[in-house]
């Protein structure tokens, strides 16, 4: 196996595969002629809405007309120093895409990953198949920083998968950037994973006891080992055998020399959709916004517990895993997904707009103007303003050009990180009673700085409205959230939070109203972050917060890595979700 690492921390790894007897080795393989079939019209979808905020929204919204060949240096450590507290929102761990049957599969993957950039900004990768060789290019940074013309020229073929990843920064993070590619007895396989396995450490310990050697600190690598040691001969049955041992959230795409496989966990925590281009190419992606960009027609979701196989014989669906009632992540509609996506069969935009309308109905306040915390609060603020009959205006302007490094003056500036990203518009705010709508409050530090920023700009009153219920529990299903002890709603009442952030009033989206809006679909969503009640309970004392959180360059036992683990269900409130969530003074 030859590996090439560029100065931009991207690697191009060609894998010519000869079947070996080794249990699992990181290397790969190719693909047949593209499959072609007529496209079908998209099904009608229900309505629901959502928005997503990212560290680097500029690249998430960059047109895909040009590549950026310049090499980038490692992110400076000062980036995390300033933004750790100031961008406190939960972060989606990653996004995945898979394409079968298009001669420009890798370039379409590249474009689809651009559309999914909001789901992960720390690393990106593509694996393409040509002549029984799985070729891999991965790198640290945004999609536009990892790929250029020459990199994509190294990825020929009609079959490809891609991945964007969020994780903590680290000098050796490249090792954990997906897709992963591995060789085993009967061939090679690549995998891209969105989610988190709650029984990861148990599975890893068992595999290591039996002699498995791990190259990364990602829970995704466990899946490859389970596939390699399966006693089943057909690759599809090996995947099913492996998935039957997994607990937690996983939406995955696999690639072999001749197959593209999509798998979703039995609860359907994380989204995964299927579409088709006009030439018959089949596409899987985390969100429909990726399908839209590459002109693929949305067909349907991959169902919870379903295995979808695409090869020269067409598309086959296997529902071989038990699938209890779905528990889809409600935060996809509150925060993660883009507003133009359809997630879990519902419009994200319509969901968020409805959340704002509910807040205006159940937590009204006399005001002169409604503004949003951009970008994730905009759609809910539009809904609030329309329902309240008050003008929506841009009271905060978000900078989309905050880079990874910057220099602060020697005279320290208060709330420097927030001010770099959000600028108040004094003409909108001065002397006004302002309602500001945001999607959530996590630690409360950013909210307090935003309130202070608005009042310094002349706002007479600041009324905070939050388009989600209070977050009291950590997520173990693929979202990077703080431990429960750090969540402000797990430690304080609504009135105490209001005092902490300094607003004149504070209201959260009532939980009962949220479930009423979802109607018969309500039982199909996961609300663990609001209730502390988990559909899949962690089976060990400690669980990994996100699958790629552990520092990649670390050697030694996982038990010694405190930063990547959080206590399972410790100090979480036992009482029912607070329904009286409005406080005014």
Image (spheres, rainbow, N blue to C red):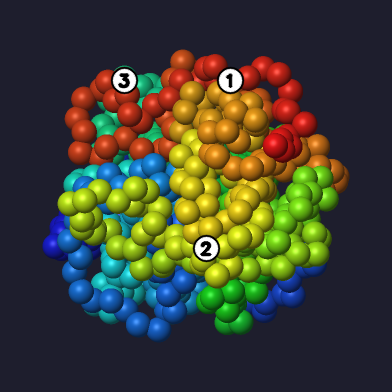
30 sits to left or right of 538: left
Sort mark 2 into few (<14), some (14-19) or many (20+) by Cα contacts within 10 Å.
many
Going from N to C along the chain, the mark reached first, 2 or 1, is 2
Identify the residue at image location x=37%, y=48%: 415
Going from N to C along the chain, the mark reached first, 3 or 1, is 3
Q: Check whether the beta carbons of the residues at disc 3 and disc 1 lie within 8 A of each other.
A: no
Identify the residue at image location x=80%, y=59%: 388
Label 2 – label 1 distance at C-alpha: 34 Å
110 sits to left or right of 315: left
Location of the N terminus (image quadrant): bottom left
Q: How far across and down, in percent of the image, does residue 70 sit?
A: 20, 74
Location of the C terminus (image quadrant): top right
Going from N to C along the chain, the mark reached first, 3 or 2, is 2
Determine the secondary structure under disc 3: helix
- According to the image, label 2 marks what residue? 396
- According to the image, label 1 marks what residue? 572
Q: Is residue 149 above or below residue 482?
A: below
Q: How far across and down, in percent of the image, does residue 444 sit?
A: 51, 38
Rendering quarter of residue 38 = bottom right
Rendering quarter of residue 403 = bottom left
**Closer to viewer: mark 2 or mark 1:** 2
**Closer to viewer: mark 3 or mark 1:** 1
Identify the residue at image location x=49%, y=62%: 424
- According to the image, label 3 marks what residue? 559
Label 3 – label 1 distance at C-alpha: 23 Å
Q: Check whether the beta carbons of the residues at disc 3 and disc 2 lie within 8 A of each other.
A: no
Q: Is residue 181 above or below residue 279?
A: above
Identify the residue at image location x=52%, y=63%: 396
């Amino acid at each position: 196996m030859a590996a090439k690492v560029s100065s931009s921390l991207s690697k191009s790894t060609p894998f010519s595969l000869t079947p070996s007897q080794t249990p699992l080795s990181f290397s790969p393989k190719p693909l047949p002629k593209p499959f072609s079939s007529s496209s079908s019209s998209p099904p009608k979808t229900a309505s629901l809405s959502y928005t997503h905020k990212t560290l680097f929204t500029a690249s998430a919204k960059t047109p895909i007309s040009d590549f950026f060949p310049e090499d980038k240096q490692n992110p400076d450590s000062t980036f995390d120093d300033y933004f750790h507290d100031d961008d406190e929102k939960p972060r989606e761990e990653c996004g995945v895409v898979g394409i079968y049957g298009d001669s420009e599969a890798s370039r379409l993957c590249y474009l689809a990953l651009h559309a999914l950039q909001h789901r992960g900004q720390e690393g990106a990768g593509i694996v393409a198949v040509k002549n029984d060789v799985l070729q891999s290019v991965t790198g640290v940074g945004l999609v536009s920083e990892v790929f250029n013309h020459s990199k994509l020229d190294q990825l020929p073929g009609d079959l490809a998968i891609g991945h964007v990843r969020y994780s903590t920064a680290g000098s050796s993070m490249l090792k954990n950037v997906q897709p992963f590619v591995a060789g085993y007895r009967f061939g090679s396989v690549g995998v891209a994973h969105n989610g988190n396995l709650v029984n990861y450490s148990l599975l890893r310990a068992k595999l290591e006891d039996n002699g498995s050697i791990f190259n990364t600190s990602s829970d995704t690598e466990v899946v490859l080992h389970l596939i390699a040691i399966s006693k089943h001969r057909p690759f599809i049955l090996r995947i099913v055998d492996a998935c039957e041992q997994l607990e937690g959230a996983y939406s995955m795409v696999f690639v072999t020399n001749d197959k593209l496989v999509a798998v979703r966990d039995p609860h359907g925590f994380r989204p995964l959709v299927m579409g088709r281009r006009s030439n018959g190419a089949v596409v899987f992606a985390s969100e429909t916004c990726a399908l839209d960009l590459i002109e693929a027609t949305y067909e349907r979701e991959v169902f919870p517990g379903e295995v979808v196989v695409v090869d020269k014989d067409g598309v086959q669906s296997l529902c071989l895993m038990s699938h209890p009632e779905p528990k889809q992540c409600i935060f996809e509609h509150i925060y993660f997904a883009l507003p133009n996506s359809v997630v879990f069969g519902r419009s994200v935009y319509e969901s968020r707009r409805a959340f704002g309308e509910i807040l205006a109905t159940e937590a009204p306040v006399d005001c002169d103007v409604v503004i949003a915390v951009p970008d994730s609060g905009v759609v809910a603020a539009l809904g609030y303003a329309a329902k309240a009959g008050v003008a929506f205006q841009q009271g905060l302007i978000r900078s989309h050009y905050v880079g990874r490094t910057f220099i602060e003056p020697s005279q320290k500036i208060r709330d420097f990180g927030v001010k770099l990203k959000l600028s108040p518009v004094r003409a909108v705010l001065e002397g006004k009673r302002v309602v500001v709508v945001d999607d959530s409050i996590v630690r409360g530090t950013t909210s307090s700085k935003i309130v202070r920023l608005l009042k310094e700009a002349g706002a007479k009153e600041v009324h905070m409205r939050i388009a989600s219920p209070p977050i009291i529990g950590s997520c173990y299903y693929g979202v990077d959230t703080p431990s429960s002890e750090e969540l402000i709603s797990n430690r304080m009442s609504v009135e105490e939070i209001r005092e902490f952030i300094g607003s004149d009033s504070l209201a959260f989206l009532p939980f009962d109203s949220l479930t009423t809006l979802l109607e018969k679909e309500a039982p199909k969503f996961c609300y663990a972050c609001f209730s502390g009640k988990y559909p899949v309970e962690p089976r060990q004392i400690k669980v990994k917060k996100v699958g790629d959180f552990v520092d990649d360059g670390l050697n030694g036992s996982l038990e010694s890595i405190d930063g990547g683990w959080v206590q399972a269900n410790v100090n979480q409130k036992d009482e029912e979700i607070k329904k009286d969530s409005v406080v005014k003074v």
